[in-house]
Image (spheres, rainbow, N blue to C red):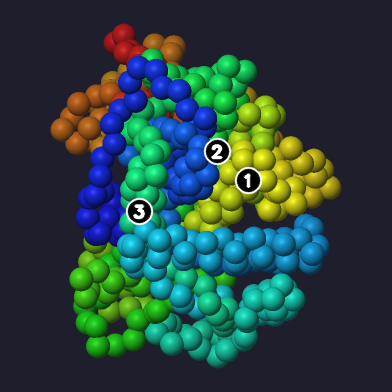
């Protein structure tokens, strides 16, 4: 699986694996947009910085995003106003609008186009259901009150589908997020920052400011930043978020003569995100959707098939050329958690929901200002230590009830099987064999790989994800490849290798 952004080609630079011992001022765990943007600001201020990435720069959620940049939020500003108030909405929009401007300045500084273009955003309604019409009207009213250039129009240019009404918001943007990551990494290196790839972190000692990788290499730093999409290890914030996966496809247009969408398009009824992307003169249609809780659902590769059918029903496209997935962490009170954590020298950035490309730049500014002793740019709005029971209680209760259910019932629903030949090629199953449970995967070549199905984070049982060919934890979103190695999420350690006795 590969996102369409990879058409831009391989990374212009590779970075070494962390070895030995390194001393810096700030250790940043995670080489995505949050980590790299934070590193660049700190390097510019003269700080010694090390970025430690478990895989490769931009290979996580940053490189699997939509490439859409906007001052609003995908779930709608009206939801934030209901939880909070209009003043909070105004602050959110102001932070995100400033971050979007900062991204544009970075693109210009990096001397890389990154396919950055200012484009409009559209909330679209296809059906005549009154509920969606009222939602659109409310979103229009909240957006105008927050200072956005919004209007309701009949039909946007270039979207090949029948629409009832459209809320159009001007002066938003799009880019290639992977190219932008590469540009940031190059700039960080140019400014003296250290970047290490293929260096998964296995332990963080906040008191000593010590970060240790799985290979035993060490970075010592006065300040540590978790730019990992969700904090690693055990964190109270994990109990305050729901974890989702969303899927994307891209398909080349058969003809460039007709209309195709130039901008950001979201359909509210049966949510789909639609945009175009052009590479070497060939336009592609990009469709993202099929959102579901991580570790839940049986549709598997059907998610991609549904998105492909949506694209074919509205555009003259060839066969799907790219498909990918990404993870989202949604906070209980709808605002991200950014800044100092329980330890004064440890910083986190999480809870972006589906809006991480712009929140990542906000987070970089907030965290770097705190590290440098400058005035908070968010006025404490995104403080991870905030206590908002009135706004969070319902979502918190629902999320943690699901976790408790998985912990108490998953072990009793495991299928019993003594003949592993019944696990087909390319298939994964959690099975009980001789009284013990195993996560069993058979490769397309027929090789069996057997692991413990118990997530090392908080002991929930992983589920097989047939869309992404991974073992996913339904409790807090840790994900593992078929070898058991950590792909993403709060888990430090891999799934234990375990061989059944048959």
Residue 479 is drawn in which quadrant?
top left
Residue in the foreground of this view, choosing between 431 and 390: 390
Instruction: Indicate which disc, 2 or 3, sits on the residue closer to the N terminus.
Output: 3
Q: Secondary structure at mark 3?
A: helix
Mark 1, residue position: 369
Which residue appears at 24% of the width and 49% of the height?
Answer: 12
Image-based side of 44 in relation to 353, left or right: left
Mark 2, residue position: 230
Instruction: Indicate which disc, 3 or 1, sits on the residue closer to the N terminus.
Output: 3
In the image, residue 268 sits, relative to residue 176, either above or below, namely below
Residue 393, given in percent of the width and then of the height, sits at: 78, 43
As measured in the structure, the alpha-carbon distance from the residue carrying label 2 to the one carrying label 3 is: 24 Å
Which residue appears at 43% of the width and 13% of the height?
Answer: 436
How many marks do you count on the picture?
A: 3
Q: Which circle marks residue 183 in the picture?
A: 3
Residue 87, given in percent of the width and then of the height, sits at: 79, 64
Instruction: Indicate which disc, 1 or 2, sits on the residue closer to the N terminus.
Output: 2
Image depth: mark 3 or mark 1 in front: 1
Dot 3, crowdedness within 10 Å: few (<14), some or many (≥20)? many
Q: Secondary structure at mark 2?
A: loop
Visible residue check, residue 212: yes
Image depth: mark 1 or mark 2 in front: 1
Farthest bottom residue?
Answer: 154
Image-based side of 88 in relation to 47, left or right: right
As measured in the structure, the alpha-carbon distance from the residue carrying label 3 to the one carrying label 1 is: 22 Å
Farthest left residue?
Answer: 445
């Amino acid at each position: 699986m590969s996102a369409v952004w990879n058409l831009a080609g391989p990374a212009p630079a590779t970075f070494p694996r962390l070895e030995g011992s390194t001393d810096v001022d700030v250790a940043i765990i995670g080489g995505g947009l949050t980590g790299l943007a934070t590193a660049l600001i700190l390097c510019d201020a003269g700080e010694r910085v090390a970025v430690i990435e478990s895989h490769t720069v931009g290979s996580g959620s940053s490189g699997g995003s939509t490439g859409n940049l906007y001052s609003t939020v995908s779930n709608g500003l009206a939801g934030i106003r209901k939880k909070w108030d209009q003043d909070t909405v105004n602050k959110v929009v102001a932070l995100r609008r400033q971050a979007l401007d900062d991204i544009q300045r970075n693109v210009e500084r990096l001397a890389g186009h990154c396919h950055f273009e200012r484009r409009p955003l559209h909330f679209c309604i296809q059906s005549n259901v009154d509920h969606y019409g009222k939602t659109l009207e409310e979103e229009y009213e909240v957006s105008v009150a927050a200072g956005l250039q919004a209007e309701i129009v009949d039909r946007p240019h270039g979207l090949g589908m029948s629409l009832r009404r459209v809320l159009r918001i001007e002066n938003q943007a799009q880019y290639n997020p992977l190219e932008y990551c590469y540009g940031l990494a190059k700039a960080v290196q140019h400014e003296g920052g250290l970047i290490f790839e293929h260096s998964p972190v296995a332990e963080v000692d906040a008191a000593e400011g010590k970060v240790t990788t799985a290979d035993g290499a060490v970075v010592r730093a006065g300040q540590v930043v978790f730019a990992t999409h969700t904090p690693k290890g055990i964190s109270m914030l994990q109990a305050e978020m729901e974890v989702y996966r969303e899927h994307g496809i891209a398909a080349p247009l058969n003809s460039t003569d007709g209309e195709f969408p130039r901008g950001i398009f979201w359909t509210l009824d049966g949510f789909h995100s639609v945009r175009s992307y052009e590479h070497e003169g060939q336009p592609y249609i990009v469709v993202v959707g099929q959102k579901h809780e991580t570790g839940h659902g049986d549709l598997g590769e059907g998610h991609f098939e549904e998105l492909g059918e949506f694209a074919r029903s509205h555009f003259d496209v060839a066969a799907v050329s790219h498909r990918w997935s990404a993870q989202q962490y949604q906070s209980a009170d709808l605002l991200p958690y950014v800044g100092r954590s329980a330890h004064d020298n440890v910083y986190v950035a999480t809870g972006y929901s589906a809006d991480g490309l712009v929140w990542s730049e906000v987070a970089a500014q907030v965290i770097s200002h705190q590290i440098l002793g400058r005035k908070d740019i968010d006025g404490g709005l995104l403080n991870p230590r905030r206590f908002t029971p009135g706004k969070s209680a319902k979502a918190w209760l629902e999320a943690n009830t699901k976790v408790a259910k998985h912990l108490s019932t998953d072990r009793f629903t495991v299928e019993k099987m003594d003949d592993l030949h019944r696990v087909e090629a390319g298939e994964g199953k959690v099975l009980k064999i001789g009284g013990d449970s195993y996560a069993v995967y058979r490769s397309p070549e027929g090789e069996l790989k057997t692991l413990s199905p118990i997530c090392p984070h908080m002991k929930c049982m992983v589920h097989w994800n047939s869309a992404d060919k991974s073992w996913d934890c339904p409790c807090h979103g840790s994900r593992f490849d078929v070898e058991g190695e950590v792909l993403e999420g709060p888990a430090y350690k891999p799934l234990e290798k375990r061989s059944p006795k048959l």
